[in-house]
Each structure stands twice: as structure tokens, then as C-alpha cells.
Amino acid sequence: MKIQESSYSSDSAPNLKDSAAMGLFPSRLPHVGTTIFTIMSALASESKAINLGQGFPDFPCDPDLIAKVSTAMLAGHNQYPPMAGIVELRTAIAQKILAEYGKSYQPETEITITAGGTQGILTAVLCCVHPGDEVILLEPAYDSYQPAIELAGGKPIGISLQAIRNPEGQVTAYEIPWEKLSQAINSKTRLMMINSPHNPTGMVWGKADLDRLAKLLENTAVLVCSDEVYEHMVYDGQAHQSVASHPQLAKRSFLISSFGKTYHVTGWKIGYVAAPAALSHEFRKVHQFNVFTVNTPVQYGIAQYLQTAAHYQNLPNFYQAKRDYFRAGLANTRFKLLPCPGTYFQCVDYSALTVPEAKLNESDFCRWLTTEIGVAAIPVSAFYAKPLESGVVRFCFAKQAETLKSALLRLQHL
Ligand code: GLN
């Protein structure tokens, strides 16, 4: 059976006919198929390609973290934890946010443990967006945002980041289209989704950007869902700018983070949402009937592990070395490297390659790269609701040196 690609990608078709043919009920998400990450990982595995597509590390987490989780399990922490998460973990998170961003959240009322960032995002959207509300998102946007808004009955308003091009027409950077954002806000706007460091482009917001957003929202009731799951992957000596560090934004924001990203355990599906008490109260009403709570022993293990900040404080250097190695390996090729100030994703423009496949759209190019060259990537077009082809694909460099080396040997032939 052919798997239908998520239509949060440029080349997939609505699936209405299928559900109608099955005579069941109209789909709640008629334009959605399987996510591009699942599709490309399946293709990579089928083709025995090196998987630089879906974002996940191919190296283990710290054995000490595993030991701490195992100890919690052996100690009998295996029944339901409190609905919002164990207080030890919420307290450790509050201390971390205070130390990193200078904002004090109350563990009891303002921090909720979630089953990963995606559940946090969906729950935040569901708890505040009503049918007919507008939600602004910046495209390319992570592919869960639009379906989350649609499930709430909201109307996604996609605003494209402005692609800056060199004289050869290649994309060299992305900028926030402030004018367009300002024009998109009206009395129906309920929420704005922001994401820094940004998946897939790697761009990061500066302090001035947060100031500008705060100014834009100043006299509105617009809430903010701030996806900061790559908060500890900001490079070149820059600091991550969290909404938590900005008092005017913090009071209207759901801050989303993910331990999977920070601790190399994407399969554990655990993260958190920090938000003012009134927002957290509504968030928890939805959360309790969605997942109710999140697995207990991992919460205990992470609560202990968070006592030492060294791991996440070293993360920028750890990933910057991988980024630099990967970029150096592509520097003398015809791939045009986009800037990568954050995340573990490197975007490249492939339009100047001399192979005929350089003319393919992003999705077909990624399929070809996976099946014929043996390296999987993600088409950036999959992060847009309506087709937008820029000739740019995303590689994940959260990989062991040997994996990156083998991938580079294949890519350097092009
Ligand atoms: N966040 C990951 C990425 O961008 C993928 C997560 C998923 O597969 N749903 O690659």
C-alpha cells in the first residue's frame, strides 16, 4: 500500500475520497497523511541509506541518566504520578528556568510535565483556541502546528519567513516578515506560534525580535505558544532568547520544551510546558483528559539528573562541533549551506548541483538522494501548507562522527 505523505508537504493530495469510500465518517484532518519524518525514515531503512532525515541522535544518552531512571523503577516508582507531574521534577525545572532565563515559575501551578513537546503544543492549542479563532504561524513551520490548530477548529494563518537570496537565486537566509505579521493580527487572532531555534531553518530569534513581538502584541489579547525544544542548541556564543526571559511575553505565553531533545532520548517522549497559572490551569484541564500524566520513573530519573546543569550547559559546544564538521565537509561541494545558528539541522540549497536531479522538486530530490545516493534528508517544502519550492533540504547532524563521515563521502560526489 502506498503511504500518503503528510499534506503539510507540497506534493500530497487530500485524502477525503479514501474515508468517504470506506463509508466511515468525514476525516477530521482531511489534508493530513503520514508525517514526512516517518515517510523518510521508512524509505531510509528500506534503501539502507544513512538517515539524516528525521531529527534524532544516533548516539546513546548518558548512562548515568539510564541508571537514575532504572533506580527509580527498582525503587517502586511505577504507579501514577500526580496529574501535572512529580513535584521534584517541576521544582527542578523551575530552578533551571530561573537560573537560565531569570523568570520564576511556581512548580505547583505553572509547570506541567508532558509526553513530549508535540503533546504540549497540541494541548496548549486545544485549551485556548475556539472554532473560528485565527492562529498565526510562521512558515516553514513544524508539521504538527497546523493539524493542532485545525483539531481545535481554529483557522491557521500561515505567514512565510522571508527567504533572502543571493544574485544566483539561492536562498542564503530567512527573515521574520514583521510587516506581514502585524497586518495578520486582528480581533479574531487568538494565538501566535513561534519557534526559536527554528526547525527546519536553524534560525534563532534575538532579543530585539522578542522586543518587537512584545510591542506587536502589546495592546492585544493574543497568546503565544513558544516552541523552544532546541533551547540548548544555540551556537557561536549566542544565548537562547526564551519568552521566559521577557516579562511582557512570559505573561501571555506557553513555553514548550523537550527532554528528548536535550538529553538525546527522543523515544522517551517527555517534556514540559511552563505558563502563568491562569493559562496552566486551562492547559491542565485538557492535559488530564488527553494523557492524564506522564510515566513516573522517567520523571524521577530526570528530576535527579537535572540537579547537575553540566550536561545542557555543554550541549552548545557538543553540537557546534558536529555542525562545524558537517559544514566543513560540504564546504567544497555545490551545495549552498544556509546559516545554522541553532538546532541540529543544517539546510542546504541544492539548485547548483550539476546532476540532472538538481532540477527536481524538494520531495523528489530527497527520494532520489535517499534511494540513489544513500543519504536521507527532509524537503523543506513539507513545512508549508501550500506548495512552496525553494530548492532547500534539511539534514540532521545529531549523529556520530562516523555516520557524518560516511554521509559526507556520499554527498561529496555530487
Ligand atoms: N522533530 C523531529 C524532526 O523535526 C521529528 C519528530 C517526528 O518524527 N514526529 O525531525
Image: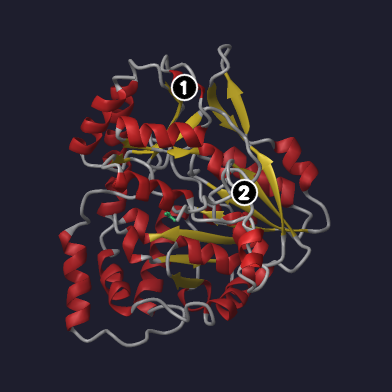
Q: Earlier in the sequence, mark 2 or mark 1?
A: 2
Q: Residues within 10 Å of mark 1 (few under 14, many from 20)?
A: some
Horizontal side of 362 relative to 193 (left or right) equals left
Is residue 323 or residue 11 the one in the foreground? 11
Question: Is 268 drawn above or below residue 186 in the view shown?
Answer: below
Q: Residues within 10 Å of mark 2 (few under 14, many from 20)?
A: some
CB atoms of marks 2 and 1 within 8 Å: no
> Does residue 104 appear anywhere in the picture?
no
Mark 1: secondary structure: helix
The residue that appears at 61% across and 59% down in the rendered structure is 147
Farthest residue, direction right: 187
Mark 2: secondary structure: loop
Is residue 57 or residue 181 the one in the foreground? 57
Q: Position of residue 36 (x, y in %)?
A: 47, 48
Q: Position of residue 206 (x, y in %)?
A: 54, 39
Question: Is 308 drawn above or below residue 348 in the view shown?
Answer: below
The residue that appears at 31% across and 52% down in the rendered structure is 312
Which label sits on residue 93? none
Which residue is label 1 attached to? Answer: 358
Horizontal side of 281 relative to 233 (left or right) equals right
Which residue is label 2 attached to? Answer: 13
The residue that appears at 44% across and 42% down in the rendered structure is 239
For residue 301, which quarter of the picture?
Answer: bottom left
> Does residue 387 appear anywhere in the picture?
yes
Is residue 239 or residue 325 the one in the foreground? 325
Q: Position of residue 128 (x, y in %)?
A: 67, 69
The amino acid on which the numbered mark 2 sits, given as a three-letter code, is Ala
Horizontal side of 303 relative to 365 (left or right) equals left
Q: Position of residue 367 (x, y in %)?
A: 42, 37
Horizontal side of 383 relative to 102 (left or right) equals right
Instruction: Identify the image quadrant of the C terminus.
Output: top left
The amino acid on which the numbered mark 1 sits, given as a three-letter code, is Ala
